[in-house]
Structures are given as structure tokens and as C-alpha cells.
Image: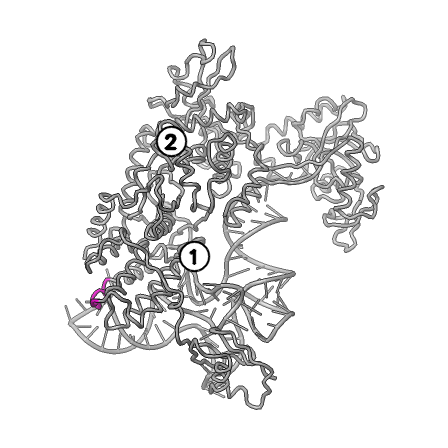
RNA sequence: GCACGUGUGGCGGAAUUGGUAGACGCACUAGACUUAGGAUCUAGCGGUUAAUUCCAUGGGGGUUCGAGUCCCUUCACGUGCACCA
């Protein structure tokens, strides 16, 4: 039997019969399974893709057999740096490179037999798609959710390009290894921080795995605290600090402003000016890396003093880069006795340290380190004797009463920097007019196409390559008709992937990004699978995007993704990440050619815990080939019969139940072991009925769809994909007779056979009669006998 | 540093609510059938012992009739965020 031929045959059958078409508005129950659509990179499909796609494919196939209307789509996330770099390197237009890569990916997916509904395929780079990404950007703009601001970005001086934070991890350019520098650039921003609280609350309406929710929560980074205003001595000025411990205000012995703080210039005294300016200059020249890698605190005194609002003490104001301008208010009150960073700084600059929390457990010695634990307030005036919570509440009352502070919630999450100085992204549909300022394009003029020229390499100026294409840049103002220029930055790669799952619900719509009718029918993404690396940012961006669309009435739910699961990576057989340089890459095409798609699929499901990383093993793969061969061989035992064999009835019913459960609980590896056990049971028999065989084939079909269809056809049944999933009878999942263990004082001393009708008394009798158990009971007093039905007997003796 | 995750045979990994630890598979050993086997079958396979004897789920302690599973503590590895006030 030639598996490659069989696979081709069934793949053609499914194509011709549109076996996996999802029907909008069907009476069947809708079920939407989504896998993260890939970057069609030049390297082709990775065995890691095969793992997650097979898992979701199996779920989709099972759900279809169970009578549900399954939406299981596939598309391409083809904008972004990798595609652009590939194009630059190979000197072809990214559009062409993407086209070729998509072709490769799609063919590979076809040979693996994934049951995608290919009618819904699109790429984020299709004008018909990015038209709507642009349209949605305009909605953000029109609802005052998009604005232009000058912010620091990561800039690689060698590659002459802006890098994302991910590409610039550790302050080093991922591609060339150069030091990344900070550059101020004018950028489009989305007001994502306005949604911080809603993004947090919305998690309650999802079924994300706890660790996924936690990732979202951490990223949003909510902290509840207070703002406190400090008057500057001798100035009619004050500054505000953010603190989570306003109750320690009596212990504040100095304040720190970030070097970028706008008050620095105003309050710095003449004799400190030189020093302060020098320090600020120094900070500006430091890269992000240098600013964080050197943990030794630096800073300078401004010469000015702040007035502590609770005791009117005058405390010095410093500037230091350990205070971040981007978090809170860019200014802090420092309580060196109870904060290790402030402690370090105070020690270095000889600033007094006042203890305001009692360290009853003597956890810290203030001569050496700060005490960061909890304690009762001391040296704190009206807070003395109170605990943390009482102290905070009392202090908040005081601050509000005296109008010098208030309760305040802060979030780490910032607004979304939405501009990229790249060619290969969605053009931002904004036009700059000298007299009207920024003007949005008319929606009717969308899509704003990327120009069709081959000038896509980075410029020396830090502008997008689009800036060089004057024909494209020069336009007229939609408002006044005067000469104007287009925005030349493009959108980040996260844009297109923030709403693609909505488009799959209505992919050919040319009137709207997706109709409300279709979105209401499909309801939500029931099951979304992706890599752990995307569970923080991509998911957050997508949720933000959806919540915004919901708020302007364009999608039916505030959360459009219900369950989110993530898979582990497939590692090389050396347990390291697969990479060309290590030579440990496995190409799925080679495996398909040599062992068949079904074997690869079975192996990838069987290889290990789905959520855990797992090394590749060709030996184990061969074991899966043997399993499939065994299933083929079982055909020789098949005799006529439309009933299950009596003695296989229980194992069959049990298997159906377990497989159904495991398939929906990420237990793919145990689905396979259940099937292996079932096949082994069949193998022990001389003969099995057609019905026995068919149920095995049907249960295995979602994971190994080709060979099971072929075998099923060969015994005269209609295709599995047109048939139904078997049901089980709960009654018949219980064995009549089972063997259980007998313990004496918790140690296993024997085994007994019991039937399901045995009473507790009968079980006790059998346990006491067991030979080895009797030996251990000699001359001992039985205290009690614990019988756990169907599990174990434990005899407690003295 | 903080947060989270993971530690079970030679290997990948099983073990609904605490209930026979090591399912299933790989690798390995011995044998059978074969011209041959990288096919198939049969038996074995955590360590230990005279012994269903004792020891074993990273280490130590605890709760329980009973702990891989719950609690405390400690170590190792992995991931994320990293001066977030």
C-alpha cells in the first residue's frame, strides 16, 4: 500500500466534495476553531506548526463528525520585518516573495491533510483585507483613539531602521548585533491605556487558561496607590509623585525627579545648574541598556527643597535616572528605610533614613538594608500604631482633606506605538496638509495601496522607504484641496493580526470588514490556539482592538475569543531549539515522503504533553508507523457483523468516552495511547467484526484521516467524513470484574478480583482471605478496614 | 530581584476528586519464524532482596488509614518582566 498515493487520493476527494466548508448561518451548532495564522517565511512549514495544526485539525474533524458546523480557517500574516528582510536579501519585491512562500506553505498544509476551509483564505497583505485594517485605523482616529506624538524609539544605526522592543531585546539589534540607541520620533499612537481597566475586567468573560490570564494581568500591571503633591520651597510650583505606600510619607527624606521632568529646569538653583545639566546630558547619551545594566545609583542634587505635606519638613530634591519618566508621574518620594532602591541612593548621598514601620521580627538591619516587610507605624504622627491598611486609609483621608493628594490607580501598560518606518506594512491612511494639519483619507478612497515599485530598502534618514517615492507621497488635502503629503510610516505587524479572526467569519465582504449578521452567527472564537510567546502582546492587542470595535457598535461582543490554549515547541533531538546552524532541523516534507502524513500527525500528537516543549525523536516516529501498520493488519481479522464483539464492548465504550474527553482537554497524547490500547485488544483476538473495526477507524480518523478513510472504504462503508462520531453508553464503560489492590497500613500486600455487584462486606471478606494479606495480619489487631469502591482496600492494624 | 512554569525509569511521557506509581510508546535484552530483516511474534525491562523484602515521583519536614497529587521549607532548570515607586 502506497501511503503517498492514498493521501493524495483523499485530499483530492475532500477538495472536490468541499468536505470542510463552513456554512454561514447553518442550523447546525457553530463551532469556531482558530490557529494562529503563520508568517509565510522562506523556510517553509516547521514541524512545530504541524503539531498545533494537527491538534486543532483533529478537534475540528471530531466536532464535524459530532454534527457541528465547524469554522476552521487559515490565512497568512505576511506583512512585517521577516518578509521584508527576506525580500531585501533575495532582491525581489516582498509581494513576490510572499506569494511564493504562501504557495509553498499552502502546498505543505495540503499534503498534511489539514481540514481548513480554503474558501476563506486571505493574506493580511491583500488590498481587499488591508483596506479594512486601514478603515479601522480611521475609526480609531475619528474616535480620538489615535494621535501623533513624539516618543523615543529603538533605532539601529547599522540597519538604519526602527526596531520593535522584541527585535531590540537587551539593547542589541537582533539582526546585526549593533547597540540600539534611543531616538525621538514622531509616531502614531493608539490610546490603549484608556482600555487598561476594561481589558482587565474583560478577562472574566473569557475562558483563557489561568496562566494566559495572568500574563495579561501582569502586562497591564495595575497598581493602586496615591498621588501626593509636594510644594517646592521658594517657588509657586508643586510636583506630584505616585506611591503605593502613602502611609510611609513620614519616612520620606528626599524626592527624586526623572531627568526629563519638566520642573527640573525651573527649580534647579544657580550653583547646581552646571552639575544638573551635565547629568541630564549624560543620561541622554546613555542607551536603554546602559541605563539599566549599571545598577549603581547615580544622581545629582538640584539645590531645591520640597515640603512634606504631613509635617512641613524640607527635604532635598534630586534628579536620578532610576526614576522613569514613563511610569507614574516621573517623580517619587523616597522612603529609604523601607525601599531598597531609595536606601541604596540615600546611603550613597548620605541622606537621613527614618524608620516608620516597626520591624518586630527583626528581619532587617537598617545599617545594612531597607526593611521592606510589614509592620506597625512608628514615628508617623497620626498613623502611629496603625497597620498597613489602616495607615493607607487614614493617610488618604488626610491627603484628600488637605487637598494635597488623592487615591490613584496606575497601569504599566502604555499607549500603543503604531508607526513603523518600513515599506512592508499597511500604509497609514493619513495626509498632512500645511493648513489643515493631519487629515484622514476619505473612506471611499481606501485601500491606500502600497506603491508597486521596488524601492523597499531602508533609508539613511530614518524615514520609511515610502518617503522616497514622491509620486506616491505627494497628494492633495481631502479637506481643502491644497497640495499635501501622505504619512509615509506603515502600521506594525500586530495590526493585521488584531482582527483577522473577525474577517474569517465573513471573508469576502466588500461592504464591511465583516457583517454583524455573520459575526452574530459564529458568535465567538470558541477555541484559539497559539504559541506561548503571543499570549501576552498579540492577545492584548487583539482584545483591545475588539473592545474598541465593540464600543463603537461594530462587533457583537466585547470579548470575541473564548478559550485560548497554547502549545509547547518541538525541539531538536538534542533538546535545543531547531536551527539551521545547529543542523537539527526536521523538515516535515521529508517525513511525509518517507513515513506518510498520517504517521507524522500521529507522532506529533503522541510525542508528549501538548503544552510542554518536546524533543524530536525519529525512533518514536517509527513506533507510530508501526501502530498504523498494526491498524492496517487488523483488517485481516475482520468478519461480517454490524455489532460490537461482546468482549470488546466495554473497552470500545470506554475508549470513545476517554477520547472525547481528552480531545477537548489537550490530552492528545493520551488519545493515541487509548487508541493503541484498543488496537492491542483487537489484536489479541482471532476475529473482530466490521463494526469493531469501523469504530477504531472513526476514532483514529481525526488524527490519521487518510489511511482510516482508505481502510474504511475497503470494508465497504461510506467515507468517514460524511458519517458520524460513535456514541458511548455510560453503562457499558464499566467492567464487570476488576482487580484492585489490598493494602495493610497503606502498603500494598495483595490483589483481589471484585465484580461490580459485590457489596462492601463481600469485598472485605475477599481482602481478608487474600494469602499475602493474611500473612501480614498474623497476631495483629484490625483497627478498621477502608474500602474505596472500585479502587482499593486498606486494612489498618495495630 | 519579582512573577509564573517544570522536576516521575536509559528516553518521551501516563496517573478525573488524595486510592495498586511507571499506562502507552521508544531504546534495550533473550528467544521464535526467516535466505535475510530496520518486518512480525513471544518473554523480560526503576533499583534492591532469599522473599509481593525493602527503597523509590529533585531534597527535607508535615497533614492523612493512604501523598507524585494537599501544606510548609529547600534546591535545580526553564520562561516572562526587569530600577513600575
User: Chain letter of disc 1?
Assistant: A
Residue A613, horizontal then vertical, whole percent: 43, 53
User: For this view, does A625 lie left or right of residue A397?
Assistant: left
Q: Residue at x 63, y 28 (%)?
A: A282
Residue A609 has which mark? Answer: 1
Which residue is labeled 2 in the image? Answer: A84
Query: The magenta stretch spans which residues?
Result: A632-640
Residue A503, horizontal then vertical, whole percent: 39, 35
Residue A510, above or below A377: above
Q: N-terminal of the two: label 2 or label 1?
A: 2
Mark 1 secondary-structure assignment: loop
Mark 2 secondary-structure assignment: helix
Residue at the limit of the structure toward the front, as seen here = A27
User: For this view, does B2 lie left or right of residue A708?
Assistant: right
Residue A6, horizontal then vertical, whole percent: 21, 52
Magenta: predominant secondary structure element? Answer: helix
Name the front one of labels 2 and 1. Answer: 1
Residue A325 in sight in this render: yes
Residue A589 has which mark? Answer: none
Cα distance in 3D space between marks 2 and 1: 35 Å
- On whether residue A676 falls in the magenta region, the answer is no
Tell which of A97 and A136 is nearer to you. Answer: A136
- On whether residue A639 falls in the magenta region, the answer is yes
Amino acid at each position: 500500500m502506497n501511503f503517498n498515493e492514498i493521501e493524495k487520493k483523499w485530499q483530492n476527494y475532500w477538495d472536490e466534495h468541499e468536505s470542510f466548508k463552513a456554512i454561514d448561518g447553518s442550523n447546525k451548532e457553530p463551532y469556531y476553531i482558530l490557529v494562529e495564522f503563520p508568517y509565510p517565511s522562506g523556510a517553509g512549514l516547521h514541524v512545530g506548526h504541524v503539531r498545533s495544526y494537527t491538534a486543532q485539525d483533529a478537534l475540528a474533524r471530531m466536532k464535524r463528525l459530532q454534527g457541528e458546523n465547524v469554522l476552521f480557517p487559515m490565512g497568512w500574516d505576511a506583512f512585517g520585518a521577516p518578509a521584508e528582510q527576506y525580500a531585501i536579501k533575495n532582491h525581489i519585491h516582498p509581494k513576490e516573495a510572499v506569494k511564493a512562500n504562501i504557495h509553498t506553505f499552502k502546498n505543505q498544509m495540503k499534503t498534511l491533510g489539514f481540514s481548513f476551509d480554503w474558501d476563506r483564505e486571505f493574506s493580511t497583505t491583500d488590498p481587499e483585507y488591508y483596506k479594512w485594517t486601514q478603515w479601522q485605523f480611521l475609526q480609531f482616529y475619528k474616535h480620538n483613539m489615535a494621535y501623533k506624538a513624539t516618543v523615543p524609539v529603538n533605532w539601529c544605526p547599522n540597519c538604519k531602521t526602527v526596531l520593535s522592543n522584541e527585535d531590540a531585546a537587551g539593547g542589541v539589534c537582533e539582526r546585526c548585533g549593533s547597540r540600539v540607541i534611543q531616538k525621538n520620533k514622531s509616531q502614531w499612537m493608539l490610546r490603549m491605556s484608556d482600555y487598561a481597566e476594561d481589558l482587565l475586567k474583560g478577562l472574566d468573560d473569557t475562558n483563557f487558561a489561568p496562566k494566559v490570564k495572568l500574563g495579561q494581568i501582569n502586562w497591564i500591571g495595575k497598581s493602586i496607590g496615591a498621588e501626593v503633591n509636594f510644594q517646592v520651597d521658594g517657588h509657586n510650583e508643586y510636583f506630584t509623585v505616585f506611591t503605593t505606600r502613602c502611609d510611609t510619607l513620614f519616612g520620606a527624606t528626599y524626592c527624586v525627579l526623572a531627568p526629563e521632568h519638566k520642573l527640573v529646569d525651573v527649580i534647579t538653583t544657580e550653583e547646581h545648574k552646571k552639575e544638573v545639566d551635565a547629568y541630564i546630558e549624560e543620561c541622554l547619551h546613555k542607551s536603554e541598556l546602559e541605563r539599566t545594566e549599571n545598577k549603581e545609583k547615580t544622581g545629582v542634587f538640584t539645590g531645591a527643597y520640597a515640603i512634606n505635606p504631613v509635617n512641613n519638613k524640607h527635604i532635598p530634591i534630586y534628579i536620578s535616572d532610576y526614576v522613569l519618566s514613563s511610569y507614574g508621574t516621573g517623580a517619587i518620594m523616597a522612603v529609604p528605610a523601607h525601599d531598597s532602591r531609595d536606601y541604596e541612593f540615600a546611603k550613597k548621598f548620605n541622606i537621613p533614613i527614618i524608620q516608620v514601620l516597626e520591624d518586630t521580627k527583626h528581619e532587617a538591619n537598617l545599617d545594612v538594608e531597607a526593611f521592606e516587610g510589614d509592620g506597625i507605624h512608628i514615628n508617623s504622627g497620626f498613623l502611629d500604631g496603625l497597620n498597613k491598611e489602616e495607615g493607607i486609609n487614614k493617610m488618604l483621608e488626610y491627603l484628600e482633606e488637605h487637598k494635597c493628594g488623592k487615591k490613584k490607580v496606575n497601569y504599566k501598560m502604555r499607549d500603543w506605538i503604531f508607526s513603523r518606518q518600513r515599506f512592508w506594512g499597511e500604509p497609514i491612511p493619513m495626509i498632512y496638509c500645511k493648513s489643515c494639519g493631519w487629515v484622514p483619507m476619505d473612506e471611499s478612497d481606501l485601500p491606500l495601496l502600497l506603491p508597486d515599485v521596488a524601492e523597499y530598502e531602508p533609508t539613511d534618514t530614518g524615514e520609511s522607504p515610502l518617503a522616497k517615492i514622491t509620486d506616491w507621497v505627494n497628494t492633495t488635502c481631502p479637506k481643502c484641496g491644497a497640495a499635501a503629503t501622505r504619512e509615509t510610516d506603515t502600521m506594525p505587524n500586530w495590526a493585521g493580526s488584531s482582527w483577522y479572526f473577525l474577517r474569517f467569519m465573513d471573508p469576502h465582504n466588500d461592504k464591511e470588514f465583516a457583517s454583524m449578521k455573520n459575526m452574530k452567527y459564529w458568535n465567538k472564537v470558541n477555541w484559539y490556539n497559539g504559541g506561548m510567546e503571543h499570549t501576552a502582546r498579540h492577545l492584548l492587542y487583539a482584545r483591545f482592538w475588539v473592545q474598541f470595535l465593540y464600543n463603537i457598535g461594530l462587533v457583537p461582543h466585547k470579548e470575541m475569543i473564548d478559550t485560548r490554549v497554547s502549545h509547547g515547541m518541538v525541539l531538536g533531538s538534542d533538546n535545543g531549539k531547531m536551527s539551521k546552524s545547529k543542523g537539527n532541523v526536521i523538515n516535515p516534507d521529508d517525513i511525509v515522503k518517507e513515513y506518510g502524513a498520517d504517521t507524522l500527525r500521529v507522532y506529533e500528537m503522541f510525542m508528549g504533553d501538548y503544552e510542554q516543549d518536546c524533543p524530536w525523536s525519529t525512533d518514536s516516529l517509527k513506533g507510530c508507523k508501526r501502530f498504523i501498520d498494526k491498524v492496517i493488519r487488523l483488517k485481516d481479522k475482520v468478519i461480517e457483523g454490524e455489532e460490537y464483539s461482546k468482549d470488546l464492548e466495554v473497552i470500545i465504550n470506554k475508549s470513545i468516552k476517554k477520547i472525547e474527553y481528552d480531545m477537548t482537554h489537550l490530552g492528545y497524547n493520551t488519545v493515541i495511547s487509548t487508541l493503541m490500547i484498543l488496537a492491542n485488544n483487537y489484536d489479541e483476538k482471532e476475529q473482530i467484526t466490521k463494526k469493531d473495526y469501523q469504530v477504531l477507524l472513526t476514532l483514529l480518523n481525526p488524527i490519521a484521516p487518510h489511511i482510516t478513510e482508505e481502510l474504511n472504504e475497503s470494508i465497504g462503508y461510506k467515507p468517514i467524513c460524511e458519517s458520524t462520531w460513535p456514541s458511548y453508553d455510560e453503562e457499558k464503560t464499566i467492567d464487570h470484574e476488576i482487580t484492585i489492590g489490598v493494602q495493610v497500613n497503606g502498603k500494598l500486600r495483595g490483589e483481589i478480583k471484585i465484580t461490580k455487584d459485590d457489596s462492601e462486606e463481600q469485598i472485605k471478606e475477599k481482602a481478608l482471605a487474600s494469602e499475602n494479606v493474611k500473612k501480614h495480619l498474623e497476631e495483629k489487631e484490625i483497627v478498621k478496614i477502608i474500602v474505596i469502591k472500585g479502587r482499593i482496600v486498606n486494612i489498618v492494624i495495630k
